[in-house]
Amino acid sequence: MMSNARTKFDRRAFLGAAALSGAGLALPAWAQTPDAGAEQFETNAYTNQRRNISSFQARQWQPYFSTLRNGAILVDTTSRDLHYWSEDQTIYRLYPTSVPVSEDLTRRGRTEVIRKVEGPSWAPTPSMKRRNPEWPSYVPPGPDNPLGTHALYLSWKYYRIHGTHDTRKIGRKSSNGCIGLYNEHIQELFGMAKIGTQVLLI
């Protein structure tokens, strides 16, 4: 059995972040960067975000993985959360996430971490560029970058688990295919995950 002490999820902190992100405050320039537009959010996104908080539950790894070799990451696109287990089972984390904005952009199945980048740059995929020709062809690391402060690149081309400077996105259907976390959470996950960490999206 996992210890509740190892479940690092501060419900009050997340509620506070959700309230701030839905408060309708004036947004800084970085909130208008590619893959962060308000038009991608669900009409009832704030309602869904608040409902999503109550669905967060700690899980056991055994129904999803046969082993914890190299650690394991489970992403649930329905409850919009990410679970991480370390190989030696001493660490378990649960984080809220953003998920793809539509079913056709959502990919499920097994993959793994193949690259880790601190301060990632970003470029739109060919399909993103076709949908949004006005987007820049390249965004360097920094506050305007849609990948936030850290990114875990997966074996699926163009798919990543990454941070975001736009905290409105977390808990919502708001990405073009990737899984987003608060920057402080991706930084922690980045430090624990390895090249070869198993990843399952359901």
Image (cartoon, grey):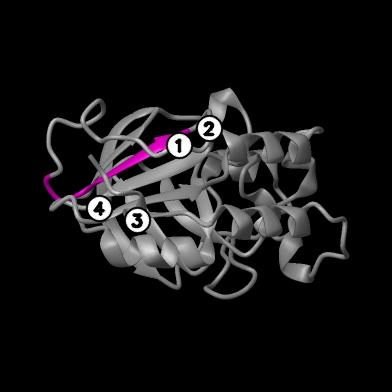
Locate residue 132, reporting x and y percent: 70, 45
Residue at 42% of width from left, 67% of height from top?
187
What amino acid is found at the position of numbered circle 2 in the picture? Ser
Q: Secondary structure at mark 1?
A: loop
Instruction: Mark yes or no: residue 104 visible.
Output: yes
Question: Which residue is label 4 attached to?
Answer: 114
**Pointer 1 or 2: first along the chain:** 1
Secondary structure found at label 3? helix
- Label 2 neighbourhood size at 10 Å, few (<14), some (14-19), many (20+)? many
Task: Decide which of tag 2 and tag 4 comes sooner along the chain.
Answer: 2
- Is there a contact, CB below 8 Å, between mark 2 and mark 3? no
Label 1 and label 4: CA atoms lie apart by 28 Å
User: Taking 181 as reference, is 97 above or below it?
Assistant: above
Residue 94 locus on image (x, y percent): 42, 48
The residue that disc 3 covers is: 5
Residue type at the position of mark 3: Ala
Residue 57 numbered tag? 1
